[in-house]
Image (spheres, helix red, strand yellow):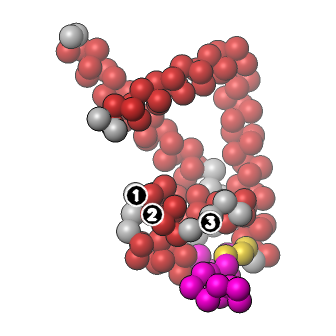
Amino acid sequence: MDEQLKKELMETFLRFKRIKISILHKNSGSKHDLNVIETVLLKKISEGSIDRFSDLEEDFHVSKSAVSQTLGALEEKGYITRELDNTNRRKRLLSLTAKGRKTVAAIDTKVEAYFASIIQRFGENDTRLLISLFNRFAKIVEETNEL
């Protein structure tokens, strides 16, 4: 197998990882006091897409205590509230404060403009092709990781 091709593929993997982080950081509303994981977590809370904390541990590849610390930091900064669920005392309900909702709205506006600009520059057809190829590629990588 072509060694140069393997090297370029690895470098591209790393480049995509850096791009992902820079997108989140650049558009997280840097005037706010949020890091990348806090930004993503805040967005997930706003979407109501957190069923279990173990899902967060898997999504972020971090420990339960790291998730708890991040939620504590968001609460301390005034972005979220955590309350016990009256129907299940082992469960915590997460909700955004007014500050959290305002921040998520600002982030959404920035991210939407960011991706609209990329699509405009790259072109709709090339964007669709990239998405199709990347999803096919990601499936292969995920299947390979399962071996």
> What percent of the width, then of the height, locates residue 9?
33, 23
Quarter of the rendering occupied by the C terminus? top left
Q: Are marks 1 and 2 in contact (CB under 8 Å)?
A: yes
Write the residue at 39% across / 32% down: 143
Task: Please say whether residue 61 is one of the residues in the magenta stretch.
Answer: no
Range shown magenta: 73-93
Q: What's the CA distance linking mark 1 and mark 2? A: 5 Å
91 is higher (above) or lower (below) than 127: below
User: Label 1: which residue?
Assistant: 61
**Disc nearer the start of the sequence (1/3):** 3
1 or 3: mark nearer the eye: 3
How many other residues sit within 10 Å of disc 2, few (<14), some (14-19) or many (≥20)?
Answer: some
The label shown at residue 57 is 2
* SS at mark 1 in the image: loop
Q: Which residue is tagged 3? A: 51
* Viewer-closest of 36 and 82: 82
Quarter where residue 107 is shown: bottom right
The amino acid marked with disc number 1 is His
Marks 3 and 2, the one that precedes in the sequence: 3
- The reply, left or right, for residue 51 in relation to residue 140 is right
Measured in 3D between alpha carbons, the distance from the residue under mark 1 to the one under mark 3, in whole angstroms, is 17 Å
Residue at image coords 64%, 85%: 88
Image quadrant assignment for residue 6 = top left
Please state which amino acid type lies under the numbered disc 3. Asp
Nearest to the observer: residue 68 or residue 14: 68
